[in-house]
Image (cartoon, rainbow, N blue to C red):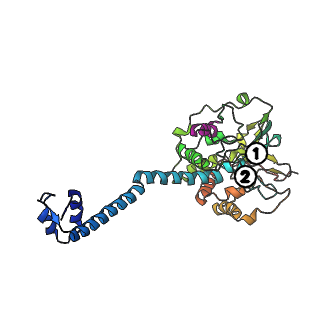
Amino acid sequence: MLIVPEAIFQNTCIFQKNILFCAQYRNYSPKKLLMNKKQWSLVLILALCTTMLSFFNACNNNDSKAPAETAKEDSLKKMVERGDYLAHHVALCMDCHSQRDWAQFSGPPKPGTEAIGGDAFDMKLDVPGVIYARNITSDTVNGIGKWTDAEIERAITKGISKNGDTLFPLMPYPHYNGMSREDINCIIAYIRTIKPNSNKVPERKLMIPMALAYPPLQSESPEKNIKPDVSDMVKYGAYVINSAACMDCHTPMDKGQFVMTKYMAGGRKMDLGSFVVTTPNITPDSATGIGKWTEQMFLDKFKLYRDHAAYSSNPGKNNSVMPWSMYAKMEDFDIKAIYRYLRTIPAVNNHINKYPL
C-alpha cells in the first residue's frame, strides 16, 4: 500500500470523473489515504500529465508578449514606416545623402549607395567652395552610429553637427525646423534602421567661416510645431511643401539670399556639369506658371514618373535636377495638398528658359 502525498492528491482530483471521489477523501489526512499500487500508478501518471500540461501552458504564456510591449512595437513600426516615407518621398534625405546617377533622367540614386553620402556640391550650385553629403548610415566610424537622437535632431532642425560645426544650408534645416516633432522623430527612427556602411566622405572646403555667414538657427525646437490637420488641405499643403523644401530650388537667389518677391517663380540655374537647367515657375501665373493646370494635371505629372521606364534613359543635356524618382511616389493626397497651397500664393509672371545653353 502507498501513501498519497497531499500535493499529488490536489492534482489527481482534476482527473476524477466522479467528483464525489475527491470529496470523499478531502477530509482525510494524507497518511490515512491509501490506494493499491495499480490505482496509485494511474493516479501518478495523470498527475504527471497535469503537471507537464501546466508547465507548457506557463511557458507559452511567458513567451507571449504583454499588450503594452506589443503596442510599443507597433508604434515603433509605424514611426519607421512614416520616417521611410518622409526620408524618401517628402524631405528627401535619401536624395542628397545617396549618390545620384546623372546618366539617367532626373538622377535617381545609384543602387547600393543609399545614405552613404559622398556626392559633391560646389560653386556651380552657389556653394562657396565644396561640400559633401554626409554618410548617415549607422556606421560608428564614418557614419552617425555614435550620434544621439538629440544630436541628429539638432542637425536636422538647427544645422549644428555633433561636434558643434554649422552645416551649410544646402541641408534645408531652416525648413525642417518647421516640421512637427512627431515627423522628425519618425525620420530619426527610420535612419536608425539603415545598415552601417563604412564609406568615408571627404571634409568640406569652404571659402567663408560658416558660423559667421550662416549662424545656427536660434528659433525654437520643433517641440511646439504642430502638423496641420489634413482636413485643411491648404495649410497641410503648406506644411508638406515646406518639409520638401521646394522653395530652395523654385525660388531664385541673389548674392546668397532668396528673392522672396519671386517666391516659387523659378529661375534658379542649376549647373550639373553635364547639363544646365533652370527651375520652372510653379506660381499660379497663367502665362508663365501653372495657372492653367488642373489638380489632376498636377497629380498626373508626378504619377508619370512612378514607372521606372520614364526616367531610365539618358536624356543628355535635356536632363532635370528634379528628383522625380523619389517625389513621384509621394502620396496622392499630399501632392493634391501641395497643388491646393500653390493656388493660394501670388502669381508671378516670370518666363523661364528651361535649358539656357
Q: Residue furthest front?
A: 1
Tell me residue 355's x, y (percent): 84, 53
Picture residue at 68% right of the left edge, 56% below the top: 326
Q: Is residue 173 left or right of residue 10?
A: right
Q: Earlier in the sequence, mark 1 or mark 2?
A: 2
Is residue 284 in view? yes
Residue contact between numbered discs 1 and 2, judged by CB atoms under 8 Å: yes
Q: How far apart are labels 1 and 2 at the CA level?
A: 9 Å
Number of numbered discs: 2
Is residue 342 in view? no
Dot 1 crowding, Cα within 10 Å, few <14, some 14–19, many 20+: many
Q: What's the amino acid at mark 1?
A: Gly
Q: Secondary structure at mark 1?
A: loop
Membership of 149 in magenta stretch: yes
Q: What's the amino acid at mark 2?
A: Thr
Picture residue at 71% right of the left edge, 57% below the top: 324
**Label 2 sits on residue:** 113
Question: What range is drawn magenta here?
Answer: 144-158
Dot 2 crowding, Cα within 10 Å, few <14, some 14–19, many 20+: some
**Label 1 sits on residue:** 118
In the rendered image, the vertical position of residue 251 relative to residue 103, given as above or below: above
Q: The N terminus appears in which quarter of the rendering?
A: bottom left
- Nearer to us in this view, 259 or 185: 185
Q: Is residue 128 left or right of residue 25?
A: right
The part of the image, by quadrant, that contains residue 299 is bottom right
Tell me residue 86's x, y (percent): 61, 51
Tell me residue 185's x, y (percent): 55, 45
